[in-house]
Amino acid sequence: MINEKLSEIAQILCDLDSDRLVRNVDYKLNLQREIDLRELRLDQDNDGISDLIEEFKTMMGRPLFEFFDFEKIISRRTYKTFFRLFNNYNEEINKQEIETYRESREQDDFIDACMETELMKEAHRFLVREEKAPEDEEEFKKMLDDIWFDFYGRSDKEL
């Protein structure tokens, strides 16, 4: 029953995603090629690892995207507000994060942009029906903020 509900809501949300990127229209992936491990010749150690490493090195130099329509994508509010979040975090593990007013505002803008979409409105309705989220939209947005943006402890010892 749970799997059916999740499958159903996942399909509904996918169908409602008007901001979804369209492959070969908004972007094109460079799928490169798969490595057939059976074709690798054995190296001096007879383990094939050196050949595999060389094959990966050859492939790694190629970009993942052949094409990415950044201007079109950034014109969509959800993406624009999402991209603004990228510089809000310190990648150094042992440095404490300090959230500025601007960063907090960017997070709010992103949540607001998401909540304007039919996808998130339906997700909210579903979660309310399942008694997993508050019915009040402002409380739901606070819940999203807590889930998506609350800081958590991290150190190299925890990794």
Image (cartoon, grey):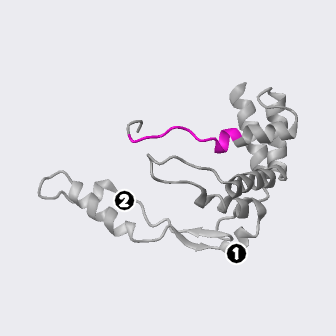
Q: Which mark is residue 71?
A: 1
Secondary structure of the residue carrying numbered label 2: loop
Q: Is the magenta stretch mostly helix, strand or loop?
A: loop
Which of these two is toward me, 148 or 97?
97
Quadrant of the frame with the N terminus: top right
Displayed quadrant of residue 103: bottom right
The three-letter code of the residue at mark 2 reads Ile
Q: In the drawing, does residue 84 fall left or right of residue 12?
A: left
Which of these two is toward me, 50 or 39?
50
Quadrant of the frame with the C terminus: top left
Please name the residue that numbered disc 2 is placed on. 35
Task: Identify the residue shown where x is 79% and y is 31%.
Answer: 133
Q: Tell which residue pokes out farthest to the left in this image.
A: 44
Task: Identify the residue shown where x is 85% and y is 37%.
Answer: 125
Q: x and y percent of residue 93 in the render?
A: 44, 47
Q: How many marks?
A: 2
Q: In the drawing, does residue 77 fall left or right of residue 52?
A: right
Identify whether 121 is placed above or below 56. Answer: above
Displayed quadrant of residue 2: top right
Magenta span:
146-156
